[in-house]
Image: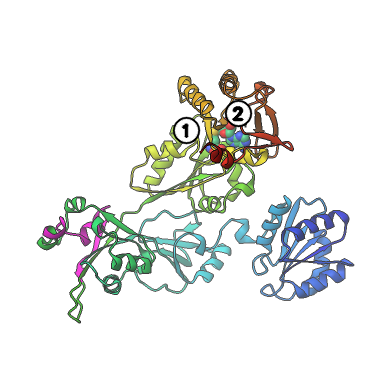
Amino acid sequence: MIGLISATAAGAAARDRLAAAWPDRTRVYEGPVGGAVRAAFAECEQLVCFLATGAVVRLVAPLLADKASDPGVVCVDEGGRFAVSLVGGHGGGANELAVEVGELLGAEPVVTTATDAVGLAGLDTLGLPVEGDVAGVTRALLDGEPIALDAEVPWPLPPLPFAAHGTHTVRLTDRADLAAGGEVLLRPPSLVVGVGASRGVPADEVLELVEAALRDAGLSPRSVAALATMDAKRDEPGIVEAAARLGVPVLTYPAEELAEIEVPNPSGAPLAAVGTPSVAEAAALARGGELLVPKRKSARADGHASMATCAVVRRPARGRLAVVGLGPGARDLLTPRARAELRRASVLVGLDQYVDQIRDLLRPGTRILASGLGAEEERARTAVAEARRGQAVALIGSGDAGVYAMASPALAEASDDIDVIGVPGVTAALAAGAILGAPLGHDHVSISLSDLHTPWEVIERRVRAAAEADLVVTFYNPRSRGRDWQLPKALAILAEHREPTTPVGVVRNASRPDESSRVTTLAALDPATVDMMTVVTVGNTATREIAGRMVTPRGYRWQEGTR
Ligand code: SAH
């Protein structure tokens, strides 16, 4: 429970917003603040005091006992500008609470403890399985002691302040070793296990074989990234279930492709039966790597007719390219997944204004490669090149990075030797739609009016098609200083098929501090009021303005009527 304490009217107003947002998590303490703080301190896990830090320091000082058990205390100032984590930053969760309260009230979280001040999140948040002395190494990291990185396997990691020699070690390894004292093991997904099997093989037989192969070779099952086999075995229940129990996907390849792969232990029997001299070894080696365990066969003592084979390969390190949409602007429209990917990256590539938008979320040590407008192709090439070098790269774009943005130029450059992770973002059309009302309630399209990359004839043809098909249209890149006639022309084409009174929504800087929006009509829209920070959404023939909002009916009734 979070105890809420306030003294003034402004404090009480902010307190009530918190209480309304978290009805089940909060309890309001009324009355003189001294007694209220004492009661809340005794009864709650956390306190939010809408009081000066000085006042709160004096009130809680006599109550403090132990940082492991004391509640976390957050102070919010009279102006609601700051949410200060005062005591219990880690144990009491005040740091996280300050961030949450800050997000809710629009206040800046103020956090002064070491870990968070330098942005080092826990070793268990790096995106890899972790074993060993996590608490000890984290403490050493916080205390600024040198930590050495021992990377037996090269793997794209987030930035951490590693030293050449350390009192503690982070070891990146797929070996089944136990962690030594003062050591943490990170498990990269570096192993691929190729499997072959006769039809009807039991999952237990496959699992036992795989586990024995890993055990005998001293390899950790937690580093297994996938089982690999041939296409024809894609649905073999024993393989599918074994993979599920290991928590990994099944990768499959066509027999012809496997037949081409050179393996140490080919055999005539499968060649005749399935069209390749090797399944387990070839599938494990299909994407390259080093064969650590050559083909082994299951040996069942019970004379069962089934049979499985397996082989283990350490695959080459794969760089990681995350293509991350940041949303339209507001921090709370950035998805948690996008935030995690930004913290996962050791290299960030993006347009300088977008980098500024999220700079505070990056881990310290993240290499930032920012460039100006117009350098799209160069940014795409840089991001892919860094990933190929084995880095964890985040390539960012506003809204959704796949919508008129970096994803397509980047993926046009990328080969299959890197992992690509797409993180969707709230695109401008959706952000604007939510502000305008419900303009996208039925079929709709987006059209960019920028003729820098697309000939105007093509754009015009698409506008015409949208006009004829009665689609709601959202124009991106509607108008800039050098491109001022395209929007009037596009609106004129729509006006050939829609009434002058058709609602048009204009949203500038959706979700940014200087957001503005209005609903007007096709006839009344003055294109000179539109710029590059704006999207323009034109309704279809069914769109109405209702109570100042733009609403496009879903059209079920229309469909029924015409059936
Ligand atoms: N990837 C972006 C679009 C990039 S194209 C996305 O998914 O939103 C750039 C155009 O997007 C701008 O010219 C403008 O038309 C529109 N746009 C982007 N963000 C916007 C915002 N916050 N408010 C209004 N329009 C925006």
The answer to whether residue 245 of the structure is visible from this angle is yes
**Sequence order check: which comes first, mark 1 or mark 2?**
1
The amino acid type of the residue labelled 1 equals Glu
**Residue at the outermost right position:** 32
> Mark 2: is the Cβ under 8 angstroms from ligand 1?
yes
Callout 2: few (<14), some (14-19), or many (20+) C-alpha neighbours within 10 Å? some
In the figure, residue 149 lies in which quadrant? bottom left
Where does the image place residue 366, in percent across and percent down from the top left? Answer: 51, 49
Q: Reply yes or no: does residue 7 show up in magenta.
A: no
Where does the image place residue 8, in percent across and percent down from the top left? Answer: 88, 57
Q: Nearer the viewer, residue 114 or 210?
A: 210
The amino acid type of the residue labelled 2 equals Met
Magenta stretch in the rendered image = 272-297
- Residue plotted at (30% across, 74% down): 204
Q: Report ligand 1 position as a quadrant.
A: top right
> Helix or strand or loop: what does disc 1 sit on?
helix
Q: Which residue is mark 1?
A: 376
- Residue plotted at (50% across, 41% down): 401
Where does the image place residue 276, in percent across and percent down from the top left? Answer: 16, 56
Q: Which residue is mark 2?
A: 532
Relative to 228, 529 lies left or right: right
Relative to 212, 100 lies left or right: right
